[in-house]
Amino acid sequence: MNSCQFAGDRLLIASHNRGKVEEISSLLAPFSIQAVAAVSLGIPEPDETGDSFEANAMLKATAAAETSGMPALSDDSGLVVPALGGAPGIYSARWAGPAKDFHVAMERVQQELGGKDRSAMFVAVLALAWPAGGIQLFRGEVAGTLTWPPRGDRGFGYDPIFVPLGGTETFGEMNPAEKHKISHRARAFAKLVDSCLRR
């Protein structure tokens, strides 16, 4: 992976997920980089046709960078449950249905899991794409266990059923600042910082 140097003050966030955009915006804030949401520029979301987090992240970042003419950062992330063969994985958002109702998605995980092993991990892959071409990938993971019923109304997605290893609170209960220290997205972002943002 080639190192990169991001010297601008605006970065397009290639996501229509408000929770993701808010998390990434707060991670970028210390670097005086303004996050611009793709939806604010009317940039549509491409179909996620990749077979991995990496492939989908690249697809979204490249499409946004080419459409906008701005450097674009995308995130493809999801919940990986080994006892479910890695599901929902790259289909994590699709399990929430067209209404993006993650209560439905969490119910499905619980039903399919039954009495199986409740180990799980969150995976996030960030892709930073440049309008003229070139892309960097950064992967972060956090291991944990699944709990039921859901707890907490902070965070988004599957956060209310995920307890990180060594913790007692779900991501849905944790203070956002504490979650940012250990989350899969924060770990991927730390790799991006090391490669691209330190000056």
Image (cartoon, rainbow, N blue to C red):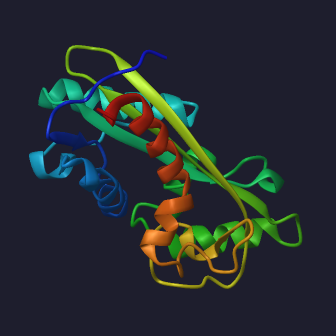
Residue at image location 41% in from the left, 43% down from the top = 75
Residue at image location 30% in from the left, 56% down from the top = 21
144, 187: nearer the viewer: 187
Residue at image location 70% in from the left, 80% down from the top = 168
The vertical placement of 66 against 95, above or below, is above
Residue 74 found in image quarter:
top left
Question: Does residue 49 appear in this view?
Answer: no
Q: Measured from the top left, where is residue 169 in percent x and y?
A: 63, 80
Q: Is residue 37 left or right of residue 109?
A: left
Question: Does residue 5 appear in this view?
Answer: yes
Q: Is residue 138 left or right of residue 143?
A: left
Counting labels gives 0
What quarter of the picture does the C terminus occupy?
top left
Of all residues shown, which one is farthest toward the front? Answer: 199
The vertical placement of 5 against 164, above or below, is above
The vertical placement of 158 against 13, above or below, is below
Q: Measured from the top left, where is residue 193 in percent x and y?
A: 39, 38
Residue at image location 27% in from the left, 54% down from the top = 30
Q: Measured from the top left, where is residue 181 in percent x and y?
A: 51, 61
Residue 59 found in image quarter:
top left
Q: Measured from the top left, where is residue 174 in percent x and y?
A: 52, 78
